[in-house]
Image (cartoon, grey):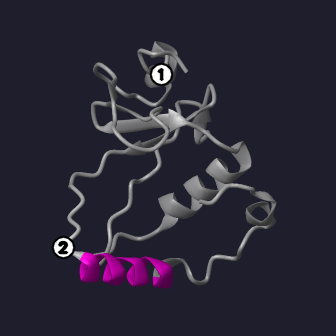
Amino acid sequence: MAEEGPPAWVRAAFAAQGDPVRLAGGKGGTWRVGDVVLKPAEGDEEVRWRGDILAGLPESPHFRIARPVRAADGDWLAGGWEATRAVAGQPDPRRVDDVIRAGAAFHEAVAAVPRPALLDRRDNPW
């Protein structure tokens, strides 16, 4: 990953327009480019599975998700990067009950999604 963010051709693949701005948190490799957030992918199979699931979820008044963005070739990946739409908001530690309700609603929305074997092969805490 370049210090200036994802390469221009990766940004173009996801139709991300503007100058890359590094986002705080995580591993320090996530960038916002206009209304698109790009980060290095960790596990192509998982990125593609997650992209399909999240793209297919109906809108909900109970939770918001960062919708995945397909690259120009139709894949969820481009050059080892993945992308999502930016979601407005700020963390608010006083809204714990809202977070729990949103988590429960999200769980309900994905409860029927079969657990893929790829999740059992992961060795990261997420």
The amino acid type of the residue labelled 2 equals: Arg
| Res 74 visible | no
Residue tagged 2: 94
Q: Is residue 107 magenta?
A: yes
The amino acid type of the residue labelled 1 equals: Pro
Mark 1 or mark 2, which is nearer the start of the sequence?
A: 1
Q: Are marks 2 and 1 in contact (CB under 8 Å)?
A: no
Quarter residue 91 falls in: bottom left
Q: What span is colored magenta in the figure?
A: 96-108
Residue 116, given in percent of the width and then of the height, sits at 75, 68
Q: CA distance from mark 2 to mark 1?
A: 34 Å
Above-or-below relation of 100 to 33: below
Quarter residue 98 falls in: bottom left
Dot 1: element: loop
Dot 2: element: loop
Quarter residue 117 falls in: bottom right
Residue tagged 1: 6
Q: Is residue 100 magenta?
A: yes
Q: Residue at x 63, y 30 (%)?
A: 80
Instruction: Kindly identify which numbered label has been placed on residue 122.
Output: none
Q: Nearer the viewer, mark 2 or mark 1?
A: 2
Above-or-below relation of 55 to 15: below
| Res 6 visible | yes
Q: Quadrant of the C terminus?
A: bottom right
